[in-house]
């Protein structure tokens, strides 16, 4: 959308089959995740053109971030932990403290870094704001693409 490049989206049931077709030459480009592609890049079976995060990855420092040649581009995969809407605030606070402590643990941070990830800690309200921003961003992308649930 930001670049004006017309690409054909080819749906796959999973990244393993997608990477098989990319390595086999049946696809020209894939927007894959770091954990699933890093070993292929290191082995030379795939060539990384860019990372889609806002900055270069420490794991692939010679690979540019897309934002370097397409200003404002950023598409990161992220995960979060949620609780049912009516969970008592005291329980949410306890869970938040424990999860933040686990994610901040040096062993956990090191393992995430090996996979190309980073850990972010914060309050539930921070995560809610992040979800709202991401929802707005991707709503525009879906609208632009013309995709529908049909």
Image (cartoon, rainbow, N blue to C red):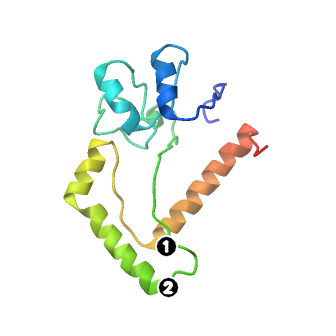
Image position, residue 12 (x, y; %): 59, 31
Quarter containing the N terminus: top right
Quarter containing the C terminus: top right
Which residue is outermost to the top? 25
Residue bearing mark 2: 88
Which residue is outermost to the left? 106
Q: Is residue 60 visible?
A: yes
Viewer-proximal residue among 95 and 134: 95
Q: Is residue 88 left or right of residue 145?
A: left
Image position, residue 86 (x, y; %): 57, 81
Residue 63 figure quarter = top left
Within 10 angstroms of label 1, few (less than 14), some, or many (20 or more) residues? few
Q: Residue at x 45, y 55 (%)?
A: 79
Q: Is residue 144 left or right of residue 75?
A: right
Q: Is residue 64 visible?
A: no
SS at mark 2? loop
Q: Residue at x 46, y 68 (%)?
A: 126
Q: In the rendering, which numbered label is found on residue 125? A: 1
Q: In the rendering, which numbered label is found on residue 56? A: none
């Amino acid at each position: 959308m930001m670049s004006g490049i017309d690409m054909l989206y080819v749906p796959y049931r999973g990244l393993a089959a997608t990477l098989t077709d990319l390595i086999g030459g049946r696809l020209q480009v894939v927007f894959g995740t770091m954990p699933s592609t890093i070993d292929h890049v290191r082995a030379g079976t795939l060539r990384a053109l860019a990372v889609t995060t806002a900055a270069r990855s420490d794991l692939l420092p010679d690979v540019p971030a897309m934002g370097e040649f397409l200003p404002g581009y950023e598409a990161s995969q992220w995960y979060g932990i949620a609780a049912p809407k009516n969970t008592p605030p005291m329980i949410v606070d306890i869970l938040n403290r424990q999860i933040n402590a686990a994610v901040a643990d040096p062993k956990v941070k090191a393992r995430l870094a090996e996979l190309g990830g980073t850990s972010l800690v914060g309050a539930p309200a921070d995560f809610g704001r992040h979800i709202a921003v991401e929802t707005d961003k991707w709503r525009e992308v879906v609208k632009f693409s013309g995709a529908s649930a049909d």
